[in-house]
Image: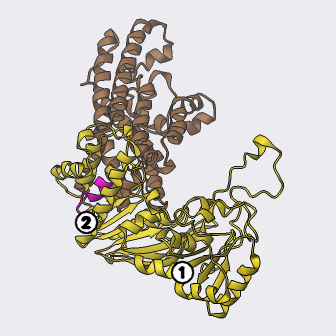
Amino acid sequence: MAAVPAVLQSEWTKIRTVSSTIWTLASALIVTVAMSAALSAVLNSTFDELSELERATFDPTFVSFSGMVLGQLAMVVFGVLVVGTEYSSGMIRTSLAAVPQRATFLFSKIVVAGVLALAVGLVTSFLSFFLGQALLGEHRTTIGADNVLRAVVGGGLYMGLIAVFSMGVAAMLRSSMLSLGILVPFFFLISQILSAVPKAKEVAKYFPDQAGSKIMQVVPDALGSEKAPYGPWGGLGIMLVWVAASLLGGYLVLKRRDA
Amino acid sequence: MIEAVGLTKRYGAKTAVYNLSFQVRPGVVTGFLGPNGSGKSTTMRMILGLDTPTSGHVTIGGHPFRRLPNAPRQVGALLDAKAVHGGRSARNHLLSLAQLAGIPARRVDEVLGVVGLQDVAKRRSKGFSLGMGQRLGIAAALLGDPQVLLFDEPVNGLDPEGILWVRNLMKKLASEGRTVFVSSHLMSEMALTADHLIVIGRGQLLSDMPVKQFISANSADFARVRTPEGEPALRDKLSGVLVEAGGRVLSEPDGALRVTGLPLPRISDLAHGADVRLWELSPHQASLEEAYMRLTQGAVDYRSTDDKLAHLQAPPQPGQPGYGMPPGPSAPADAPQQGWYAPPPPGQNPYAAPQPPAAPAAPAPAAAPRPSLQKKPSDTTEDAR
């Protein structure tokens, strides 16, 4: 039985020795922070042009996370590549010949990559928040205000969970290309579009990104967004269910299929 | 010690391996031979627990691979030279594998030296040649100093120096009392490396015996007798006499006779007694390659045919055998058929010049036998290079 600490150490070596890790995580951070800062600055200067509803539910915390729509895609790529390159390179056979216990292999990999994604997510989230608040001028809030710390930590959790969800999907599909081809349009287009279509949005509310992003809102239904039948933690719970499902699916596929 | 019992693997309707039972013992190099697609790699993957057998089981030292305690320290395997993440350096690749089994980083540098990759250790494996990839794979197999080693086609892509090195490495590992299981389709290579052979064809066991025994069991030594050309009467006369004396006579496509069961002096005496002149009387001993070809000729899945460039030159002829055609009537392996498999011309035999394609009485599709003729099976050094 390959010991879990040994597998964790090995997975850490694997993850830190490929350049895709640096590139994807760095883009997640830079894209999110830069785009959030830009949108915060824009909203600050155009605050008076917002509708009354939007002004009433203005959420400076949520505004400073608006770059995550794009930044999460880099997290998706990171999660997919961590698992998918094992398959595309054939490394999976070497790995499983060395760690015959497939659950140990998969979950060690996901723990290492997930913790790393979470750490980067938290840094991203705090940077985005402070930079965004600095640019929001008089509309800013502070980290000490009610629920703000929860939202900022939640932003980091959200990014980490998106990466872990992608890892589960890649383990199910056993292919980087296929996983990216499904996940990127889903998060970037389908989920965003469906959430604006009547009736479809009732379903879209329960998508992992829609539900999970509620944790980042301090003002309920911020900026006139759709009312959700769950709170911030409820939303994160729904996202966790999605993540658990994708991991279970990935594990079952790895366990049953021939490598 | 690797032990397979009734190993069967089906992929949908296709049976890759069927009811395979064998033992691989420590202390000797065991060669695992079979034509392309005969199930060698599938069997290797099942031994390593990568594929689950449809039925039957395989154990290493009494345990199924997936339940081995600290597998990397007990079993080392080279399955696929390119099964590495191309963006990772050779050293980091080995380091990640070493850490799994609690092997110190010092050992990584050691095996890199053993396989001769120390100068490119920091380079990404993406730029490695096939030969360098093989060396990296062998390094990974040696990492844990395991008692059981599996190598799937280890000499693919290696240069002559590398092939010699692998050959000596296998022998050395076996002499240290390890179990060494090497697959190959290069019979000539196995002849020089292996002590014991397991041959499969179409996923079934064809043979499991020591190399020496394999050769004598699968190849009948014979004498080639040639009577003057243009005098078929002499030939028939000699055949009759030889059969009468208890020999077994088969005719080869070019008109020579293949005689078994009679020693050479006796054939000469009989010919002299019958007043038949001989143009050739030569002894033949089958090489391992020949024995292998004979054994597996009925079990070849992918047989090459001549590229007739048909539609580049003229409209295709009906009934022309093409790629993927069933390999014709299969016959019991112990009855050598002229059209199917003729022995190679021995050395510089002026009479064994290229044979006309319209050889008489070829039972198989006309194109089928040619590849085996062209391959010069007796030339054991050719493939090794």
Which range of residues does the magenta coloring cover?
B137-145
Asked if residue B73 lies left or right of residue B156, the reply is left
Q: Amino acid at mark 1?
A: Ala
Closer-to-camera residue (A44/B296): B296
Q: Determine if the magenta segment contains residue A60.
A: no
Residue at 47%, 77% in the rendered image: B215
Label 2's element?
A: helix
Q: Quadrant of the N terminus of chain B?
A: bottom left
Q: Which residue is mark 2?
A: B172
Residue at 81%, 58% in the rendered image: B319
Q: Amino acid at mark 2?
A: Lys
Question: Residue A123 location, x and y as percent?
Answer: 27, 29
Q: Which residue is mark 1?
A: B220
Q: Are marks 1 and 2 in contact (CB under 8 Å)?
A: no
Q: Return the chain for callout 2.
A: B
Asked if residue B247 lies left or right of residue B194, the reply is right
Chain letter for the yellow part: B
Q: Which picture quadrant has residue A146? A: top left
Question: Residue A56 location, x and y as percent?
Answer: 44, 17
Residue at 73%, 45% in the rendered image: B309
Q: Determine if the magenta segment contains residue B141.
A: yes
Magenta highlight: main SS: helix
Q: Quadrant of the C terminus of chain B?
A: bottom left
Q: Which picture quadrant has residue B315? A: top right
What color does chain A have in the rendering? brown
Q: Which picture quadrant has residue B260? A: bottom right
